[in-house]
Amino acid sequence: MSARNGSEPNRLERRKARTRAALVSAAQSLLAEGKLNVPILEITQAADVGMGSFYNHFNSREELYQAAIEEALDRHGALLDVLCEDVDDPAQVFAQSFRLTGRLHRRNPTLSKVLLNDGLNLVGSSRGLAPRARRDIDAAVRAGRFQINDPELAMTIVAGAALCLGQLLHDRPERDDAEAADQVTEDLLRMFGLPGDEAREICARPLPSLDAPPRGDSAV
């Protein structure tokens, strides 16, 4: 009896976690479609959960949407951490993260569109690509790899390039996403002070597989 009772909270917690995950996933799909003002009923129907279940987890649609954006950023950031953990050169870490992010627009269009639809808010976000890019830029400056006078302005350029590249790849499906991502990355490296031949060589290096799971989780 005690063992059965002891397992009951675990089942309850798992059920609650599945419900929350379903709501977040539904919200991400709606955000990707640009549906920002849908009724909560439509969200719960998309998640295949009851209306009451929504309010067990979130107080409003806006709170859910914020959680959906943060979850997408965290998953993106976790994936980049895994795929760049064996790289020591901060200039290459920056380049590899940007090149991989460029490829994710086609590999995971839902995640991409969630991030693009939050656009300008991502520049100052403490999650996802932005804080990692700033960390790598600062490290590359300290190591003498980048020549940057104003890292904050450099981050503005990086964020704008990342967002505009993503939008271009959605608008122009005939473009090669890998080629475009690598060219933008090479241009950024040149702008930040790397010689052209080195920037080109870094952007031609093999990349790890995007199928790598983020630290105990499933792939983005």
Image (tube, rainbow, N blue to C red):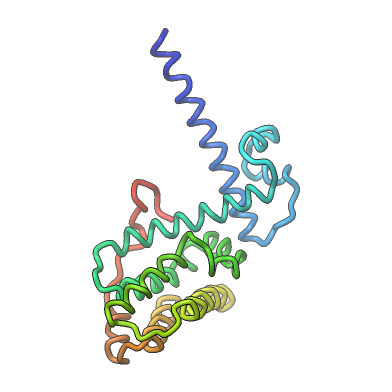
Question: Image quadrant of residue 90?
Answer: bottom left
Of the 4 image quadrants, the one containing the C terminus is: bottom left
| Residue 174 makes an appearance in the image | no
Q: Nearer the viewer, residue 175 or 197?
A: 197
Q: Quadrant of residue 102?
A: bottom left
Q: Is residue 84 above or below residue 46?
A: below
Residue depicted at x 60% and y 54% = 29
Please indicate, yes or no, whether residue 116 appears anywhere in the rendered image.
yes
- Left or right? Give the position of 63 relative to 69: right
| Quarter of the view holding residue 144 | bottom left
Q: Position of residue 19 (x, y in %)?
A: 57, 37
Q: Is residue 171 above or below residue 127?
A: below
Closer-to-camera residue (170/174)? 170
Residue 127 pos. (x, y %): 48, 59
Q: Is residue 47 left or right of residue 184?
A: right
Q: Quadrant of the N terminus?
A: top left
Residue furthest top as drawn? 1
Above or below, 123 relative to 45? below
- Residue pictured at 24% horizontal, 63% vertical: 86
| Left or right of 153 in this view: 211 | left
Farthest-out residue, bottom: 196
- Residue 172, given in percent of the width and then of the height, sits at 56, 78
x and y percentages locating residue 32 in the rendered image: 61, 60
Q: Residue at x 52, y 77 (%)?
A: 156
Image height of 59 relative to 137, above or below: above
Count of all numbered marks drawn on residues in the image: 0
